[in-house]
Image: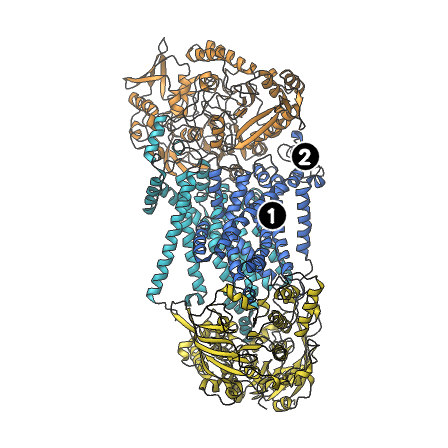
Chain colours: A blue, B yellow, C cyan, D orange
Amino acid sequence: MSDLEVQAELAAQAGQPDRSGISGRPRRFGVAETAAGVLALFLLTSAVMPQLLAPGDPLAIDPLSAFAPPSGAHGFGTDESGRDIYTRVVHGTQYSLVIGAAATAIGLGLGIVLGTLAGMLGRVVDFTVNRFLEVLFAFPGLLLALLFILIFGPGVATATIAVGLSTAPGYARIIRAQLISVRSAAFVEAATVLGRTRWQILLRHILPNTLAPLFVLATLGIGQAIVWAATLSYLGLGAEPPTAEWGAMLSAGRTYITSAWWMSFFPGLFIVLTAVTATVLGRSIDRRLRHVSVPGHA
Amino acid sequence: MNEPAAALSVRNLLVGFGAAAPVVRGVSFDIVPGECLAIVGESGSGKSVTARSLLGLAGANARVSADWLDLGGHSVLGLTEHAWQARRGRDVGLVLQDALVSLDPLRPIGREIADSLRLHTSLGAAARARRVLELLDAVGLPHPELQVQKLSGQLSGGERQRALIAAAIALNPPLLIADEPTTALDVTVQAQILALLEQITGGGTAVLLISHDLAVVSRIAHRVAVMHDGELVETGRTTQVLGSPEQEQTRRMVAAIPADKPRGTRLSEADTPNTPSLPSTRIDSSTEKTPDGTIVLEAIGLSKSFRRPDGTRQLAVDDVSFALRRGSTLGIVGESGSGKTTTARLLLALMAPDRGEVRVFGQPWTTATEKTRRGLRAGVGAIYQDALGSFDPRWSVAEILSDALGLGRQRRAPQTTARLTSLLDEVGLAATVLPRRPLELSGGQRQRVGIARALAGKPQLLICDEPVSSLDVTVQAQVLDLLDDVQRERGLSLIFISHDLGVVAHVSDQIAVMRAGRIVELGPAARVFAEPQHPYSVELLAAVPRLSV
Amino acid sequence: MFRVPVLQLLRRVLTRLAGAVFVLWMVASVTFFAVRLIPGDPAQAVLGGPGSQASPEALAAVNAQYGFDQPVIRQYFSQLGRLATGDLGRSYALNLDVGPLLLSQLGGTLLLAVVALALAWLLALALATWSTRSGRIASRVGSALEIVAAALPHFWLATSLIVVFSIWLGVLPPISTGGTLGLVLPVLTLAIPLAGFLGQIMRESLLRALESPFVLSARARGENERGVRWIHALRHASLPAISLSGWAFGSLISGAVVVETIFARPGLGRTLLNAVTLRDVPVVIGVVMIVAVAYILMTLLTDAVSRLVDPRLRLS
Amino acid sequence: MPLRHPSRTRRLLAATTGIVALGLLVAGCTPATSNKPVGEPKTGGTLTYASGDAEPTCLDPHVGGNFPQALVSAQYLESLVSRDSAGQIIPWLAESWTPSDDGLTWDFTLRSDVTFTDGTVFDASAVQANIAHLQDPTTLSSTGYLALGKVTGTEAVSPTVVRFTLSEPDSALLESLSQTWLAMESPTALKRSQDENCAAPVGTGPFLVESWVKQNAITLVRNDDYVSPPADADHAGPAYLDEVIWRFIPDSASRYAALQSGEVDVIDNAQPDTIVQAEQSDSIEHLDSPRPGSSNRIELNSGQAPFDDVRVREAFIHSANVDDAVSSLFQGTATRSYSALSSVESTAVSNPALFDYDPTAAATLLDAAGWSETDADGYRVKDGVRLSVEFPVSTNQSIPAEQSVFEQIQATAKETGFEVKLAPMDLSSWYAALASNDYNAVSAPYTKVGPDVLRILYHSDSIVPAPSGYFANLAQVNDPAIDELLTTAARTADAAERASLYADAQNRILEGFYILPLYDQQNHFLLRSDVVGLRTLPTVAVPTLYDAWLNR
């Protein structure tokens, strides 16, 4: 199992009908979901219209007010060049979200290709792809990413691709398992009995039922991708200052950790909040997708 | 009936969860030692909640109250969890349905059985081990010394259930509560377990039997209490309740039992809310049915084997041959592992036989390519045990049915709606289910949608694999009636596969009895049911749940 | 009862072994050809990188010594041959044989990973047990803790721990140079996020087990809460977490890269990161191979533990 | 090659790619001693030193020759001569030296009472063996090899007198020999394989290498037979400390935290904010010892557009607000420099007037140079080309504060219309960018004792790349007058004349606006207050633990 598979498994469990069997009603929005929703709204606004939340220039320096602790004027304090950290964190959202989304898209895309190959094209391909995945799994995530960066050089683009690559085997395995379980589902046989062709079955039953859960998976994956990408930035292999990317801000701030904790605290906080938001929302969406409304009684 | 010696005495039991309305209301009964009382009810009637409340296991958020609740003469109302722990296993034992999950699958059964001894006695390990062997012997498990180390997964269903009973009676509790103890079992095994429970009752233990199946409990219960919607609607001696039921619910349940009812007899009452349009005039039309002798489906020497995990091959279907004539029903009956489901899949050409072939409407079927077969598929419908699983979970009823009608998934066109409504009408469903997904339907509704889907292509042949096995008995009755109706209306030929000889006998013209992949007996239903030839058929017949009144 | 015929056992062992060798071979091959794509002249890397003022003669000498002038396919096979005999080659940058170098680094990383894994298990178990028995609020709190823990980036957590425990409280050393005390913060850094993951899956499966019929049966026999948990439920709850431990180990190795660097702790992770920035190809391949071997062994181990905990696996 | 190996926290690892330095001549110095001894020195104890530099791959500084090697090897190796804090060359293993009149032979008289820690006697043949080792191509020496460029041979005149023969006069010879990269090692030990010698070089120093656990620590123990401190040492006889543990903690925050918690006693590469904190703390002392050689400065590539135009170079210099950047980022720990040379070099020429922040003047200059148009983004344009400055930044060599200085320069230069494109990159990519001439500005400080560093950095010969593609004259100064001044100075023995030649050369460099000086090469140490007597050697500014003792 990979962390993705854990996430998928947990989402699936959370999506199952209430185990107590007493209340089959899907819960209304809980505290966590509401909070996650508000945060997601904030993050999306930050990414799309950062000026709305933080009208300043994230790159504007002001050497005379460098290292200012959080205050009324600078809610999150300022950095070594007097840049406003709140402004930078808000403007940095787009980088982190784009990196997270792009990495997830790459991982998911590769995963879909590999998983579909393995799940659809018969035993030989399945065997080959499986062995290939096994090999990829022998490289723990960061190792694969480091190797990739070693070859193609550091930078935002390579870091994004590297994170995508290292998550691909996890996605591939989930997709393959999902495909195989859907392929042998009773409703697929029922479609055969109704005289549907292979292609009709593939397009109308197997693919929709395999790919729909991926939306949830992608939401969950974005959180982890952001954490990984930030780690690479932190190691100096991703985004570079003065870009307001959170990982880069955090690593820049770490230098001053003993004198200016706010420089690394707030970017880190946003990384964690984003990842948590993604997890909570992913599970919530999943639950809602499964529970269209109250299941009836037998 | 408030005898002083009652093993269990309950007055006005009320159980609720959270703030919701109580799910068990005003339940009162007593059981004396050596007596077997059965509480019978359908799913959701509150019978299991009642059973668990009697052990203090209704759950943390349960509200339990009663005028009194005496176990062995002592009140157990408001006992602390700690005090309950001392009583459970010692004063009362519990046997649950399906021992595969009711015994810890990770522990040897010997350990599970010894647990009660460990918790409530000061016996040493050796003494406990001896007692476990005695218990296994007492519940009729052969070679106890070989069995104690086995996991529940290594035992057969019957062996497991015996082990579970052994665990429950380890300390000879005066009261044994058995909650659906035979439900997942084959009929022959079911009969054995019932015999065991009867024997335990004979030994002076009070047994509270919980079941959905009147026929099952009628064999051993001295008294029956019928539960409906959280209340006991009728209580009395078994013969009396089943022989001359006074209440509506009881009557309906008794009527729904298919065994010994002639072909074509209605099992359900026509005015059930789900079947508003069923014309009752068809009840006595059975004699009009005239099979014309054309063979619509023929199995010729079918064989199919599978690889076992250890590499050897298991013959699942072994040289099976039969023929189905137009307008008739062939019932295939067998216990689990007899190969009946594999046969169904072969008949549907979902897998290819190793040897032999299936011909449909006189044309090659299993030997044809899927492409040529596809042309014939419309004539062959199928109904599955797991109706829910046979629907794409993303599709609504409207989508499922319009797809089956070959109209694609568009739902808006008026003529589509008209055809859907008439199709639903035929299976006794209202058009209100159209926008819903299968997950939102009840079990009976799902199976009706399944039948509607099978009928959509105007088939001449229906293959039904355990179509009613997971349904409550009254719902089962409705579905069986429905199948009977559509067969008549459309002149369908049916293959009806079930583990329940009673059901099969009720619906079939011909019966094939399968065992270990082979057909051991094949003949007209009436004859097989009346004078079975093969010893296995005799055994099956003997085990069929019927009302023994 | 669970005796498996010797031949069958042998067959299984051989299959696993063949699988392991295949994976290692592929890992070596992928890495070998991947590093061919690395821009730059390996001979210059040997001589100290592009900043050095290596003479053409020295470059030629190095090319001959390391075989860089051979055809790629020949280098590939000689590399495989060396790997097969356990020879991981010589580091370009460190001027050392890779095998002994990595062997000396392996212990520290393994200790870190194993202790972190054990602690993560303990934390997850404690949290799962507490939050499933102390009511609705506890369950919510437990779940929230787990989700947040799983989202914590190692580097941020490490920094925060140093600030709190070394700088503010001054109770734990911020570097890890061998003492037991120095192991505390690195282990916590690795264990907390992992405990979040393990805890989530353990809690779910614990709840599932607690609601299963066999637990009801056990309660009906008079089993107390402790017995229900320790004899029945936790064993079931630990199964998915055990099979997750193979992945967990891999993620710990990833985490070790960050943690060893921050806590100045000798180990494979720090060596790897150094080697990557120095483009020290033999060391990178060496680390990759060792991690692959460790991963395979860990997978075998988790399989074995799973079979130990779940006797059903021994039957099939 | 640049010698800076600061620990970039964010880079976490300072790479050690082959590095070089050389130097000559005498220069003035500021004293650098930790604190006044309190009471009688105590013998004993273990001192733990935490370096932010990358761990050396070889403890023998003859091999390669970079600053991390110098830091540690100064504890167990000693040179023929040293330099005092006034910049005068003083005796060490050599008691005295005499150059011939033509400057082509030098006789060094050696101490006769010194033995290496393996028992080998230190004598003329030992010196010969060391010179031969440095000049042997298979040693792969860079720094030492270049420093001995003019030495053609050695001769043992007597066991205690060794003669160096030169191809031409070398006014930097003594400064070169004072550097730790040219320290003396036991000839017996040098005969071992390079692997063995790298693991434990044998010298005459106050400590000897006991063990080296790779990626963890080097353990040094006291040399009880030690007799040869340099002339400016505080005491005679063996060192006070029993043992020194030499660790590598690349992460600056961890390093400082380790010092705060007392896990370590001394750290190097201290970051500005921690220095400020330390100065307010009673338990931690600060030791500032700028490195010799060049100052830290931005070099403007005069070899290609737009900086081939002196007006554009001058405009850039006036457009950059360096003072504010340095004061905010270094918080008073670094002093602004206006010189090509380090302030420890007495020959350094400083000219603040040339480097003031004056955007108006910069704008006028750009207009005059033809960059009069402005595009939508506010950048200057000429013939449709934007006024862009490619500025590759080595993340290994520039500490975070310095990178922030560049960012602030980027921001202020933008106001005048320069588009500064900062490109942080790892060392390999950085070298590659320089080698392929893909830069307009770069910062590449160079450590070497004495002003001869100017010849390496600004002589047109240095534009010719080495086989690896690297060249030291990154400003691509190609001025025959400067070439002439530097060549002559290198051959001039007379100190005053030499100094005046170097002053002329520096003035031409500064006035040509080839460089934008920032500050000295920062070299800050922080130590626990109970570490007494620690000082840096005034040669290459590495600490020596010989006089250090623990007041606890």
- Tag 1–tag 2 contact (CB < 8 Å): no
Q: Nearer the viewer, residue C246 or B216?
A: B216
Amino acid type for the residue under numbered disc 1: Val
Q: Nearer the viewer, residue B474 or D509?
A: B474
Q: Nearer the viewer, residue D270 or B400?
A: B400
* Helix, strand or loop at mark 1: helix
Q: Position of residue B261 (x, y in %)?
A: 59, 87
Label 1 neighbourhood size at 10 Å, few (<14), some (14-19), many (20+)? many
Label 2 neighbourhood size at 10 Å, few (<14), some (14-19), many (20+)? few
**Mark 1 or 2: the one toward you:** 2
Would residue D482 be seen by someone viewing this image from the given angle? yes
CA distance separating discs 1 and 2: 24 Å
Residue receiving disc 2: A57
Residue receiving disc 1: A272
The quadrant of the image that shows the N terminus of chain B is bottom right
| Location of residue B307 (image quadrant) | bottom left
Subunit ID for the residue under disc 1 = A
Subunit ID for the residue under disc 2 = A
Q: Position of residue D107 (x, y in %)?
A: 33, 15
Please say if B54 is above or below C69.
below
1 or 2: tag closer to the N-terminus? 2
